């Protein structure tokens, strides 16, 4: 996880995170748009339009979750684990120096 930088304001933090992963806020905004429009259509007694917009919300939400999972997967670094016991002992010996 990234640490907040010293003296960083909330807007600066949002800008930093949005520029690092721009697809997540885009997907979240699309989800909110489809949800609001779908609820408005449902309230206006337009069931076909509401159903269409709710399906769009599900797709936008799925896109956002997929991008988050992909970003998490790409952020995983392989462990620096020794293959043998001898390598483990050698690494411990080097760290003691």
Image (cartoon, helix red, strand yellow):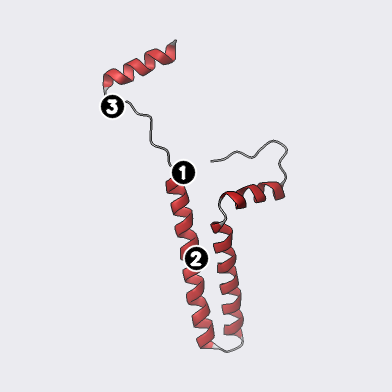
Disc 2 element: helix
Q: Report how far apart the C-alphas of labels 2 and 3 lie in the structure.
A: 41 Å
Q: Is residue 28 left or right of residue 63?
A: right
- Image coordinates for residue 4, horizontal then vertical, percent: 64, 40
Q: Report how far apart the C-alphas of labels 1 and 2 lie in the structure.
A: 21 Å
Callout 3: 10 Å neighbours few (<14), some, many (20+)?
Answer: few
Q: Residue at x 64, y 47 (%)?
A: 16
Q: Which residue is mark 1?
A: 75
Rendered view: 41 above or below 24 = below
Q: Report how far apart the C-alphas of labels 1 and 3 lie in the structure.
A: 23 Å
Q: Residue at x 69, y 35 (%)?
A: 6
Q: Quadrant of residue 34?
A: bottom right
For marks 2 and 3 on the same chain, the one whose residue lies earlier in the sequence: 2
Rendered view: 39 above or below 21 = below
Q: Which residue is mark 3?
A: 83
Q: Which residue is mark 2?
A: 61
Contact between labelled residues 3 and 1, with CB atoms less than 8 Å apart: no
Q: Residue at x 61, y 74 (%)?
A: 36
Disc 1 element: helix
Q: Residue at x 57, y 84 (%)?
A: 42
Q: Which quadrant is the C terminus positioned in? A: top left
Viewer-nearest of labels 1 and 2? Answer: 1
Callout 2: 10 Å neighbours few (<14), some, many (20+)?
Answer: many
């Amino acid at each position: 996880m990234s640490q907040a930088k010293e003296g960083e304001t909330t807007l600066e933090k949002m800008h930093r995170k949005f520029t690092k992963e721009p697809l997540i806020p885009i997907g979240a905004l699309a989800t909110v748009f489809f949800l609001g429009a779908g609820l408005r259509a449902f309230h206006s007694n337009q069931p076909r339009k509401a159903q269409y917009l709710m399906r769009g919300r599900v797709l936008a939400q799925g896109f956002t979750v997929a991008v988050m999972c992909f970003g998490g997967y790409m952020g995983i670094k392989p462990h620096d684990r020794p293959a043998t016991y001898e390598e483990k002992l050698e690494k411990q010996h080097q760290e003691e120096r």
